[in-house]
Amino acid sequence: METIEGVVEDIIYYNEENGYTVLSLTPTKAQPKSESEEIVVVGKTLELHPGESIRVRGDWAVHKEYGQQFKADTIQVVMESAEDVRKYLASGLIPGIGKEMANRIVKHFGAKAVDILDANPERMAEVPEMTPKRATVLANAWMEARGKRRVFMFLQNYGFTPAQAEQIYNLYGDDSIDQVNTDPYQLAIDIEGVGFKLVDQIASNVGIRSDAPERVIGGVIYALGQLTTSDGHTYAPRGLVVDKASELLGIDRDTCDKAVTSALRREQLVRTKRPLNTTGEAEALYLPAVYKREKACVEILLNMKRDPASRLKKVKTFKWDAFFSKLGSRNGVVLSEQQQAAVHAALNNKISVLTGGPGTGKTTTLRAVIEALETIKAKYALASPTGRAARRLNEATGREASTLHRLLGYTVDGSFVYDSENPLEIDMLVIDETSMVDLDLFSHVLEALPSGVHLLLVGDVDQLPSVGAGNVLHDIIDSGVAFVTRLDAIFRQANDSLIVVNAHRVNHGEMPDLTNTSSDFFMFGGSEGDSVGTLDLLIDVVRNRIPRKFGFDPLTDVQVLAPMYKGEVGIHTLNERLQDVLNPAANTDSFTAAGKTFRIGDKVIQTRNNYELEVYNGDIGRVLNVDSTAQTLDINMDGRIVTYKFGDANDLFLAYAISIHRSQGGEYPAVVIPVVTQHYRMLQRKLIYTAITRAKKLVVLVGQRRAIQIAVENANTLPRYSGLGYLLASKLNAQ
């Protein structure tokens, strides 16, 4: 490896999330391998500023697009001269110290200014023309910056990103280094995105044994955390946690089981009895925060059911027959007896559920609920878990609808404006797409409900459960805490339409009609096991066949929904191929943001709620423009132009193909679904059913009939351990 020292001339690119940096450097000594006075350096580091002196260690490389670069393994700030120190102080890293103050400090202390003030920050008062008050303020700012700088440099050496370093410092402060040296495993538990492999390597470097108690306990807690965040369980059987920890740690089960006991003793885990499929109860483990949330939901729901007070007092004298008659004459809407009963139940029961598959009249019934509420002048709110679902709710009802986060007043620090101490001022809350709501969000919703409020949960319980932990809609339906209406008659069905019919066939365990005789449901098959042929066929369907026959725009109207990310027909490969044929590099500019290459015109998806930009997980848009100088890109999100900083683009991914899970709450004119036997472990009835129900006008399955049959016959989705329904039912039965 080579070592080069020089002065930073320009920051070409910097990613706040992972520290990836591209900069131009003027070396203090000529570099024989460089063709110009400045060289381009790429690597990961904390934020730098032009004018700073740095030392980089790494190797030369040639990039196929950008030419010769120096790939740095390490990048360190060097402050050996008074000028280095002055530039460092003037960079704005320390609040209150600008160029003028930096000049005065260096003039007084010289090149040793940083060392002097690190050791004795109170000597700031010695700087000429410094008032005592300002000296105290700057000394305090220096001490905080000194501690943070020391921690950041320490964490950088271990491979933490700047964003993670910020989280760690905010949590542990000046004790961060001690925390890493004594128990790095706690970081994997406390800090989002810190993986176990990273902290395990750190632990090995600081001399922690593989069977050390802190490692095994940390591994046990991390294993349960993964079962919660990745698999959606609110609890897990003790044996499953032990198995996962043993696999993660590479040590025997007995040692892991003893660590569970130690974690319970330290109150890092909660132990109780919970159902284990159909084989009865077993010892179950919770993370304390999840246990608290689940118990809170149970308590609030039971109190709602028991409380006789209602904010819909006018319902007692409501003339239902006249209302339904007027509804039919005014809107031409004739509700079935089941639908009328659902409307009546929503206004007469504190907790009610409206569920059913596509075409069964959920939206029509919901509109009738809203008209009844408006008739008695009740104050209500309509909300959905995602922005996309909220927009659909608005379009379907013609009334204002918002995300649950916006309704509750989500703040950037992770709290909510509306809670138990400041409840919502509403008489009824309607939540649509409730199958997508996880336990954590649901608990916040319940805490913000006022006394006497009515709650209506709308959704399709047969779709996939939430991405987050819990199985809220399913649990509430099974528990008996709510009045449940399950609509089962199909209304939305033309003679030649098969989307709704086939969705219900799949949901009932029957093969869909694949005769290709309808106008909206087709199956194109590749050879058994020929995933490459299936991929080529799918590309042709999206690029040529659908646009030619139906006139749909492959970029705006067609959405590919796939079961898996990896594999020859996985989401990653599909996005690469579809990008190349629908938005080829030769036709547009390419650029790199957050370590990913996008092209102007690309279809992209937001994968995390960003409340500052008002974009949400699942929002899909098109890249309109990029400004390399300002490090920003403009994206059209459903008609609204959103300007992203390059750092924010970390949450963006290509969206020519997306996962079926991410499609929940969305609706697309045409849906194309690859179904191949290579996706065997993901071929489940709920998955295919959910994908089909996302289409408005056209469904095309591409793959093998055998794979579709496997999915239809597989009703045994992976178990999701959730205690909400069990606890509710137990307490209701005990009354």
Image (cartoon, rainbow, N blue to C red):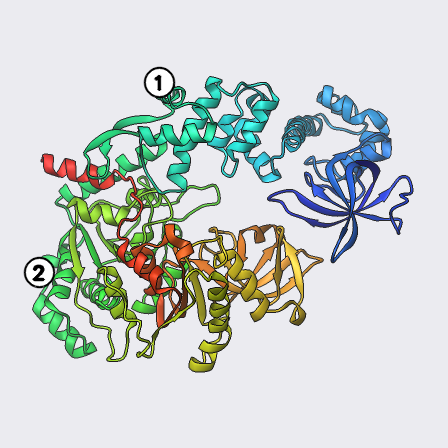
407 and 673: which is toward the camera:
673
The part of the image, by quadrant, that contains residue 224 is top left
The part of the image, by quadrant, that contains residue 673 is bottom left
Q: Is residue 705 above or below residue 302?
A: below
The x, y position of residue 322, in whole percent, is 9, 71
Residue at which label 1 appears: 265
Q: Is residue 602 left or right of residue 66?
A: left
Say whether disc 2 or disc 1 marks the residue closer to the N-terminus: 1
Tag of residue 317: 2
Image quarter of the C terminus: top left
Which secondary structure, mark 1? Answer: helix
Q: Is residue 632 above or below residue 717?
A: below
The x, y position of residue 563, in whole percent, is 41, 56
Residue 433 can be seen, yes or no: no
Q: Is residue 465 left or right of residue 586?
A: left
30 and 677: which is toward the camera:
677
Residue extending farthest front:
528
Residue 321 can be seen, yes or no: yes
120 and 215: which is toward the camera:
215
Q: Is residue 34 left or right of residue 644?
A: right
User: Of the residues tagged 2 and 1, which is closer to the observer?
Assistant: 1
Q: Residue at x 20, y 63 (%)?
A: 369
Q: Residue at x 15, y 36 (%)?
A: 730
The part of the image, by quadrant, that contains residue 645 is bottom right
The x, y position of residue 368, in whole percent, is 20, 67
Q: Is residue 576 above or below residue 549?
A: above
